[in-house]
Image (tube, rainbow, N blue to C red):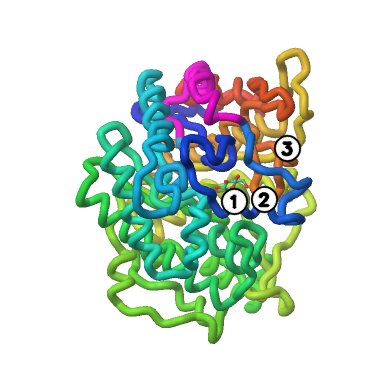
Amino acid sequence: MKTHTFPESFLWGAATSAYQIEGSPLADGAGQSIWHRFVRTPGLVKDGDTGDVACDHYRRMKDDVAMMKRLGLTAYRFSIAWARILPSGRGAVNEGGLGFYERLVDTLLENGIQPMATLYHWDLPAALDDRGGWLNPDVADWFADYASVMYKRLDDRVKLWATLNEPWVVTDGGYLHGALAPGHKNRFEAPIATHHLMRSHGKAVQAYRAIGKHQVGLVVNIEPKYPASDKTEDLAATKRAEAYMNRQYLDPVFHGKYPDEMTEIFGEAWPEWPQEDYDLIAQKIDFLGINYYTRNVVRHEETSWPLKAAPVRQKQATYTETGWEVFPQGLTDTLLWVKKLYGDIPQYVTENGAAFFDPPTASAGRVNDPLRVEYFRTHLRAIHAAIEQGVDLRGYCAWSLMDNMEWSLGYSKRFGIVHVNFETLERTLKDSAQFYSSVIASNGTALDAGA
Ligand code: BGC
């Protein structure tokens, strides 16, 4: 039997994001975000769900941290809602909103849990969207100013900062296909949004060097791409898919340019940018956060826009409720792929998890979620395999701490290791939380047992 032990300093965390859990979006002087507006536009979110209450974490924060402590978490990754700090996105600081994150960080530290703060998890202040949002080149200064407010206030207590969560999703969902806020569908906007997101990241890293004393990084979602066959056209489609989703946001940070395939994918919509922008984007970062959920097997498909590539469903695989194949080997492959292409940057798995069906009400204090337990067992083994193969992996965060507002899918998909009853807001540890807790308590050896 294989033994799974992890480095002494390995961080065991769970992740959430502000809009998905907090509720009380306008409390204590906060401004509206693009999500506040998006959910109020009929037809955009399943069942008309909103984040107005969500998990009510804004008001239940202390109990939620106590629950994290009971689980044995040593890290907690959360995001800061920009519009709570700067209600119009710029200008005067709203102490009411900032106070919430100060209290959160202090409560985490009192409980021995290391805070990992993400500055942007998709909730742009609506006032900035009115000025063009991620399409306006000035957004890089707005973001760096906001980031500086947070560094000044919290860097004495927060040692791990991430600038952006998943810039690919911000662009693909927000500006190309429109399923996420601000809901644009525009092939010419998407490359511009990408570029200003990356410039904003660069400026926020620069700002950190002037103020911060710890570590700053970027969080990307990586979905490894495997060709459906060795036909030339499938191999080329796989390369395009990998460039679009995975390398578009890492090549400029580590290699100072976008992948060559981008021009092929976007054609006339792909602009030229000045060299100084690339220099800005390629600021040295201290770590990379990887969000991994699934893989993608790719075949050429002429009619599929803009990649001319389509996913191939695997007959014998388990699929989650969001239609994602369970493929743990892809997580090992991803961490090794990053090391191979971008070098020995310290990595964290900042999100990993699965939506499976759970009943809306827990029964007798229990939620039996065997598929999610299996998902975590196999993916935690997969990160162990990557560490054995030389990846400098410093920590892991389960997505998500608790069931929450799954963006345009509303409350219809449950990703939590903790169950939330959305009528009573009662929390119940699922079996997957108990399992993860036992992995943490045993520093990994609980992964030895089981199939
Ligand atoms: C995001 C989360 C989201 C999760 C599951 C990630 O892309 O960072 O906010 O809930 O995936 O869809």
Residue at disc 2, CB closer than 8 Å to ligand 1: no
Residue 102 location in percent, x, y?
37, 31
Vertical comparison of 247 with 424: above or below:
below
Q: Are marks 1 and 2 in contact (CB under 8 Å)?
A: yes
Q: Nearer the viewer, mark 3 or mark 1?
A: 1
User: Where residue 35 is drawn, which disc sits there?
Assistant: 1
Q: Foreground: 283 or 422?
A: 422
**Left-right relation of 236 to 13:** right
Magenta segment: 56-76
**Can residue 238 be seen from the camera position used here?**
yes
Disc number for residue 39: 2
Which residue is found at the position 72% from the left and 43% from the top?
A: 49
The amino acid beneath tag 3 is: Phe
The residue labelled by disc 3 is: 356
Dot placed on the residue nearer the N-terminal end, 3 or 1: 1
Whole-angstrom CA distance, mark 1 to mark 2, is 6 Å
In the rendered structure, which disc, 2 or 3, sits on the residue that comes first in sequence? Answer: 2
